Amino acid sequence: MSDIRDSLDKILAVSIDSIKDEQNFLNLVLSDSPEGNILKELPIFKDNGALYKLIFSVYATFEYTIKECCNTALLTIDKNSLDSLTDELQMLTFRQKLDELRKKMIEKREDNTVIKPLTDLHIKIKQQTEFNSNENMIDTKSNLNFNNFTEILEIFHFDKKKYKSYSIIIDSIITYRNMIAHGNRKDLTEINIRQYIPGNYKIITLHKENNRLYFEDLCSDMINLLKLFCQDLTDYVNEQKYLRQDK
């Protein structure tokens, strides 16, 4: 199926361009060019502001690409009978309905009994015979660290060993992203960050240093990760790995 390859390539191309644009912009800020000198004087780009802009953008591109590519792949599986699909894909359908039930249960209700919502859930599951994807099936939890990413790999039966080397990239960028998102930018210095956040991650730097994650390496590794993931998704669809092997 060339369609899935073409669809994923379009998403991937936009994402790669976005990462490269951020990388080029940061290099411009760091340069001694007239433009770079002007940018360096802007308050938003002082104190590593341009680096944090790149980190935030690259993480957003990573999360978007993974989710969008997964949703695109799942669309190709629509209308297959649930019984013909892997347990993991059937689980996606069940998990969504379970989440809907959970939301209903925490709503204020005059009737506290669980019988009615549980019965409704049972009926819905029995009634659905075909796989119907939607954009909420793949849950990144808005915090796509390596553990959450691994859950997505397991849904599609991808070889997790191939992705293990990217764990430090993912967990480093999510660590910084979360600190920035929570307004703790001042605590991101190499001296301070380890005091605030424990964990297995690398310090992201503007220059190559031993045992540090250089921002250009971060960008190139992220691009390679997204390429690998898209290739695995292509094989998953083209080789019909979504079908049960015991059928």
Image (cartoon, helix red, strand yellow):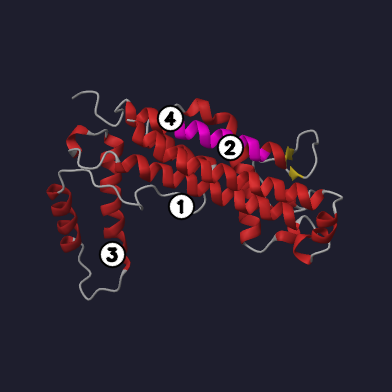
Mark 4 or 1, nearer chain start: 1
Left or right, 51 with reference to 228: right
Q: Which residue is mark 3?
A: 105
Dominant secondary-structure state across the stretch colored magenta: helix
Q: Which residue is mark 1?
A: 141
Amino acid at circle 1: Lys
Q: Which residue is mark 4?
A: 232
Residue 62 x, y percent position in the rendering: 54, 45
Left or right, 114 with reference to 49: left
Please indicate, yes or no, whether residue 191 appears anywhere in the rendered image: no
State which mark lies toward you, 4 or 1: 4
Secondary element at image label 4: helix
Mark 3 or 2, nearer chain start: 3
The quadrant the C terminus occupies is: top left
State which mark lies toward you, 2 or 1: 2
Secondary element at image label 1: loop
Please determine whether, in this image, residue 162 is positioned above or below residue 209.
Answer: above
Residue 3 x, y percent position in the rendering: 34, 36
Count of marks placed on residues: 4
Q: Which residue is mark 2?
A: 223
